[in-house]
């Protein structure tokens, strides 16, 4: 599996109502999208940033998306954003059954003196310990081998239920809507 995200700083005159309308119009276009397991429409109102997050079955499906008209719609509306991608090391669902309303991402450098396999194993063990946390919709451990960064992404029923994280870069988002094709563990 492959995780992918891009962020768009919205124009100042693009208000909350417009982002809701944009998400409502775009979400319908992803129904039945080949290889898309999840799409979360994320928004940081404080920073005025739109940051959709995708989970693809594999890199080929992600590439197909970037080269087709769905992604062209993004570039026509907001310009061409930088797209980040990560290998999915672990992805599982927590006990929350309803759609998530909050996502927290924590990104840290992989220390150069540490074996990557051992670090990922430790993160997978921590990942397993989080899975019974009330309010958790899903948690994932990601690896970017280009930048040698690990990502810990969690989706929650509410911000209040989220387990605090520490990392070099922590981002908080409201989940405006989600597309979920799969059930059970990824």
Image: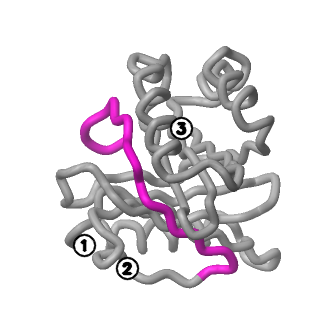
Category of crowding for the residue at label 2, using alpha-carbon neighbours closer than 10 angstroms: few (below 14), some (14–19), many (at least 20): some
Give the label on residue 32, or none. Answer: none
Is residue 147 found left or right of 57 in the rendered image?
right
Quadrant location, the C terminus: top left
Residue that mark 2 sits on: 163
Q: Which residue lies at the image location 60% right of the left edge and 74% below the top edge?
A: 170
Q: Position of residue 64 (x, y in %)?
A: 66, 19
Residue at x-position 67% and y-position 74% = 169
- The residue indicated by pointer 1 is 133
- Look at mark 3 in the image and give the residue it sits on: 1
Residue at 73% from the left image edge and 77% from the top image edge: 114
User: CB of mark 3 within 8 Å of CB of mark 2?
Assistant: no
Observer-nearest of 71 and 130:
71
Residue 77 placement: quadrant = top right
Residue 33 in the image, given as x and y percentages of width and height: 47, 19
Does 95 lie within the magenta span?
Answer: no
Q: How many marks?
A: 3
Closer to us: mark 3 or mark 2?
Answer: 2
> Residue furthest toward the front?
13
What range of the chain is rendered magenta? 167-186
Rounded to the nearest whole Å, what is the CA distance between mark 1 and mark 2? 8 Å
Q: Is residue 84 above or below residue 49?
A: above
The residue depicted at 73 percent of the width and 37 percent of the height is 78
Secondary structure beneath label 1: loop
Q: Is residue 167 left or right of residue 84?
A: left
The first of marks 3 and 1 along the sequence is: 3
**Badge 3 density bin: few <14, some 14–19, many ≥20, Cα 10 Å:** some
Q: Earlier in the sequence, mark 3 or mark 2?
A: 3
Tell me, yes or no, whether the two marked residues, 3 and 1, touch with CB atoms within 8 Å: no
Residue 51's place in the image compared with 71, above or below, is below
Mark 1 and mark 2 in contact? Answer it, CB < 8 Å.
yes
């Amino acid at each position: 599996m492959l995780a992918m995200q891009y962020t768009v700083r919205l124009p100042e005159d693009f208000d909350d109502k417009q982002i809701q309308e944009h998400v409502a119009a775009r979400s319908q276009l992803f129904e039945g999208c080949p290889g898309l397991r999840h799409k979360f429409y994320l928004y940081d109102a404080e920073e005025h940033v739109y940051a959709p997050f995708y989970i693809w079955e594999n890199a080929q499906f992600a590439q197909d998306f970037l080269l087709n008209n769905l992604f062209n719609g993004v570039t026509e509306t907001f310009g061409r954003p930088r797209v980040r991608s990560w290998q999915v090391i672990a992805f599982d669902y927590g006990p929350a059954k309803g759609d998530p309303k909050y996502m927290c991402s924590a990104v840290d450098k992989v220390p150069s003196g540490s074996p990557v396999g051992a670090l990922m194993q430790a993160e997978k063990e921590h990942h397993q310990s989080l899975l019974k946390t009330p309010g958790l919709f899903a948690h994932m451990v990601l690896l970017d081998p280009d930048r040698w960064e690990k990502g810990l992404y969690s989706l929650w029923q509410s911000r209040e239920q989220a387990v605090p994280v520490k990392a070099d870069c922590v981002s908080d988002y409201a989940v405006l809507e989600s597309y979920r094709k799969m059930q059970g563990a990824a």
